[in-house]
Structures are given as C-alpha cells and as structure tokens.
Amino acid sequence: MNVMNKTNQLKAAIDGPLSLDTLAENARQAAQAFIAAGTAANTVRSYRSALAYWAAWLRLRYESVLGDGPLPETVALQFILDHLARPLEDGGWAHLLPPAIDAALVTAKVKSKSGALAFNTVSHRLSVLSKWHDVNKWPSPTASVAVKTLLREARKAQVRQGLEVRKKTAVVLEPLQAMLASCTDGVRGIRDRALLLLAWSGGGRRRSEVVGLTINDVRQLDADTWIYTLGATKTDTGGVRREKPLRGPAAQALAAWLEVAPAKSGPLFRRLYKGGKVSKSGLSADQVARIVQRRAKLACLEGDWAAHSLRSGFVTEAGRQSVPIGDVMAMTEHRSISTVMSYFQAGSLLGSPASQLLSREAQPNHDSAEPDLGHD
C-alpha cells in the first residue's frame, strides 16, 4: 500500500476538516468531562439542583425550555421578584410567584416547601444560570445593571426589615467539649470523637475533605502527634499534597479509632453496622453533617448545627484565643481573608477589653487621683 492510499484512508475516516474557531463535538465532550471531573461533587449536585429548578420554573412560568437559547434580563428580574420576599406597608411580606406554580414546584420535588426563597438561594441560582450561559457561550442575563441593582436593593430592603442571612451555629470550644462528652457509646463514640476532633482541631476541615481522607493519608509521629495529608480540595486543586498536624486530644482520639478499626487501606472514617461492626465503606459528606447534629442533640445544645459548624467554630475559637490570622488561614486554607474575617473577628471581640468596659477589671480606681478636667 503506497503513501497516497494510506492518506486517502485517513481522510475517509475523518468526517471532515475542522473549523479553526470551533471545537469538534468529541473535543467539546472531552472538555466538558474534564470540567465535570475537576468540580467538587457537592458543587456538581448543587448545580444540577439549581438547573432542575430553572427548567421547572421556566416551563411553568413561561412555557419555555431551558437550553432553547439565551434568556433575556427580564427573566432574571422576574425570577428575583418571584422568589425574594419584599416588605409590605402592613409589616407583612409578599413575593410574586403565583400560588399554583409554587405548589406545582413543590409537587415536582424541585422545591422543598412553598413560599419565598432565602436570599442566598436566589443568588446561587442566578450564579448557576450565569455559568450555564457561559458554557453555552451566550450573554448572561444576570450581568445587566438592572439585575445587579435589583438584587442589591432587595438585599438592603430585607436587612432593614430584619431578615438576616442564616449562618450555621459555630462549634466553639464549649459546645465542642459538650459534643465530645456524648461520645461514650462504644465504637460509634470512638469514631465520632476522632472525626469531630480531626475536623475541628485539624483546621476546620470541610466535610468533603474529612470523608476524602484515607488510611494512607495519616501517620503517627509520636504518642501526642499525628500528621494527616490533604490532596485536592475545594480551594486547592493543584494536586500538591499538604501536611497538617494533629496534636494532643485529636491525636489520641485518632489513635483510639484506628485501634478499634484497624485497616491497611481504604477510607479513614467508615460506616458502622449494628453492634459496632466497622464497614469497609466510607462515610458520605451528608453523614458527617448528621454526626454533628446527632452529637449536638445528645449534648442538648441549641442552635442550627451542620458540618460547616466545625469549620466556622475553629476560626471563631482561634479569634477568641488571639491566634494570628495567618496561622489560622494556613490551617484552614482559606484563600480570601474577607471570608475568614467575619468568624475570626466575632471570636476575637469576645475577648476584647472593649467588650468588658463595665467589668470589675475595667472599672476605674476611685482611690486614685482624678485628672483635672476643668469646668463646663
């Protein structure tokens, strides 16, 4: 077979020449696969949920199909007005979503309950819509000045009327100790104690980071010190593995867990069967949240607890104990100082002399001579 015949066969195997400014369909699919694989599972789930909601809302509100083409800014404006509660003169609240459509969305199980959505939920769904348009190379309806202005003013109106962004209750030292005190129920208690202390003392780890740890990611230095290694995380996708310390009670709790649940490989934190038998399968991210909630309930703690409570609690407690914020961020791996500062400042102010001006220590010494301030 000569060179010409080989060339003809190659040409026959190709559908046609590629355009210089367009990706081939198989290349587009490969690119989307890379994006999907590089996105955290929780993020993928939240995007799917948001897009499912957009699809249902568009169908019911406009008899339109998501993906038919770019949406105009008026659709984004209507979405905000349909879902964000606005204050009324009589002190009540209202939103524009028709009750029949609201009920249909609940029936379709894309909405958990009827009524207005939280501001953060609306913001997230607008962000997902924007990303959806970016992927399709369409102009985003959320980028307009009108949409940004409405969203900003709606937020101000809600704040002025007393609606606040809900945050999960932070697990500072006292509630953490109460949760740990509840961990007396055999193997389950040993596992939960180790998980809570690693997630909290180890730098306020996200639940995805906790369930992603394996047996091979931890090693003991001495009786009081372990090292665990992080790979790719939500904010660090470079693949460089970073070591973090576990000291004191956290190290001892991890050693106790591995003593009752020894393994040469596999997930570090595993599920339990009835009777305390340890499974080979690892915990899910949702189970980490349920462990925090269960321990808070057993400790009779009031609050809105979740897995993120451990992360926010670590930062808040570090502020209370005046740990330098650089050291805190080295452990948590926060990229944005503004994100971590709200928790850090809340903790640091709890121990600030400015918050104790009426305490006995801060009261003036009436026995000392008073300065002459002159006359009015």
Image: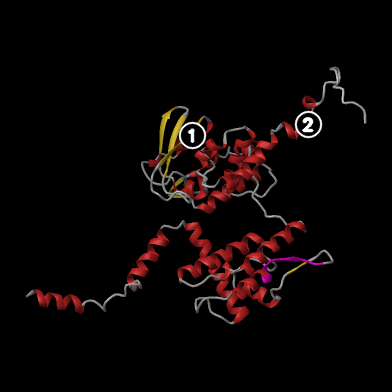
Say above or below: 323 vs 26.
Answer: above
Asked if the stretch drawn in magenta spans residue 122, the answer is: no
Say above or below: 95 vs 238.
Answer: below
The crowding category of the residue bearing disc 1, from other C-alpha atoms within 10 Å (few below 14, some 14 to 19, many at least 20), is: many
Query: Which of the 4 quarters of the picture holds residue 324?
Result: top right
User: Front-most of 56 and 142?
Assistant: 142
Q: Is residue 187 visible?
A: no
Foreground tag (2 vs 1): 2
The residue under the point 35% across, 66% down is 30
Q: Residue furthest right?
A: 376
The crowding category of the residue bearing disc 2, from other C-alpha atoms within 10 Å (few below 14, some 14 to 19, many at least 20), is: few
- Kind of residue at badge 2: Leu
Task: State the image coordinates of residue 18 (x, y, percent, origin top left).
Answer: 29, 75
The span picked out in magenta is 81-88
Query: Which of the 4 quarters of the picture holds residue 260?
Result: top left
Residue annotated with mark 2: 357
Instruction: Report the quarter where the N terminus lies.
Output: bottom left
Query: Which of the 4 quarters of the picture holds residue 56?
Result: bottom right
In this rendering, position of residue 225 left or right of residue 124 = left
Numbered circle sitting on residue 117: none
The residue under the point 63% across, 39% down is 172
Say above or below: 324 vs 288.
Answer: above
The residue under the point 68% across, 43% down is 301
Asked if the stretch drawn in magenta spans residue 86, the answer is: yes
- Kind of residue at badge 1: Leu
User: Front-most of 39 and 275?
Assistant: 39
Residue annotated with mark 1: 246
Q: Residue furthest bottom?
A: 63
In this rendering, position of residue 370 left or right of residue 10 = right
Q: CA distance from mark 2 to mark 1?
A: 37 Å
User: Front-most of 18 and 298?
Assistant: 18
